[in-house]
Image (spheres, helix red, strand yellow):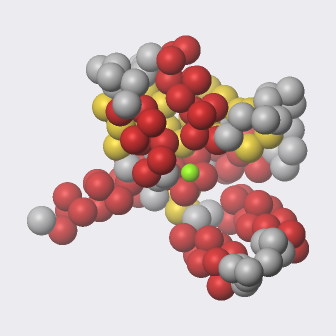
Amino acid sequence: MIMVDLEGTLSDHEERLATLLEHEDKYKKRDRTHWKTYYAGLINDQPRPHIMALVREYINDDIRPLIYSTRFINKYKHEEEWLKLHGLWESVDLLQREPHQTKIKGPELVVQWVRQYEPVLIIDDRDEVREAVRALNLPTVAYAPNAFLNLEEI
Ligand SMILES: [Mg+2]
């Protein structure tokens, strides 16, 4: 089984992330308005072609990738919509943060899921997640979309 992060990994969120960071005031709390715009923008993200191709290859081999998001389930519903829009909904499983999981940080939640599902491969755009997964010393391979892009440049 493989686990693939949705936002920023399977989807390309770079444009809206740049907008969010542009408006971030480093000396004050982040402006909620811009965060809301950022959160609502997932549905407009294009897929990252390399990750989408990889996910489709697994599906073609009858393996259901586990797509995950550490956002709360049922909050925006954009995760499901995005997967439907890009033709993946019937072929993948979607895993999200449950309503009671309020205290746990995103990377820690992913680590919990990795322990539970023991994937052979996990792809996540966050360094923190990959490092935490590697620290588990499981045979799980932890990769990032940028690593794939860099390979293309060699
Ligand atoms: Mg991500």
Which quarter of the image is occupied by the N terminus? top left
Residue positioned 79% across, 35% down in the render: 103
Can the viewer see residue 61?
no
x and y, in percent, of residue 8 in the image: 54, 57
The answer to whether 15 appears left or right of 65 in the picture is right
Whether residue 35 is situated above or below residue 60 in the rendered picture? below
Residue positioned 63% across, 32% down in the render: 109
x and y, in percent, of residue 25 in the image: 73, 82
Residue positioned 68% across, 40% down in the render: 105
The answer to whether 4 appears left or right of 107 in the picture is left
Q: How many marks?
A: 0
4 or 126, which is in the foreground? 126
Question: For the view shown, which residue lies furthest in the front direction?
Answer: 27
Quarter of the image holding residue 120?
top left
x and y, in percent, of residue 148 in the image: 29, 54
Quarter of the image holding residue 101?
top right
Which quarter of the image is occupied by the C terminus? bottom left
Residue positioned 29% across, 61% down in the render: 149
Whether residue 152 is situated above or below residue 87 in the rendered picture? below
Whether residue 153 is situated above or below residue 5 in the rendered picture? below
Can the viewer see residue 25?
yes
Whether residue 57 is situated above or below residue 45 in the rendered picture? above
The answer to whether 13 appears left or right of 85 in the picture is left
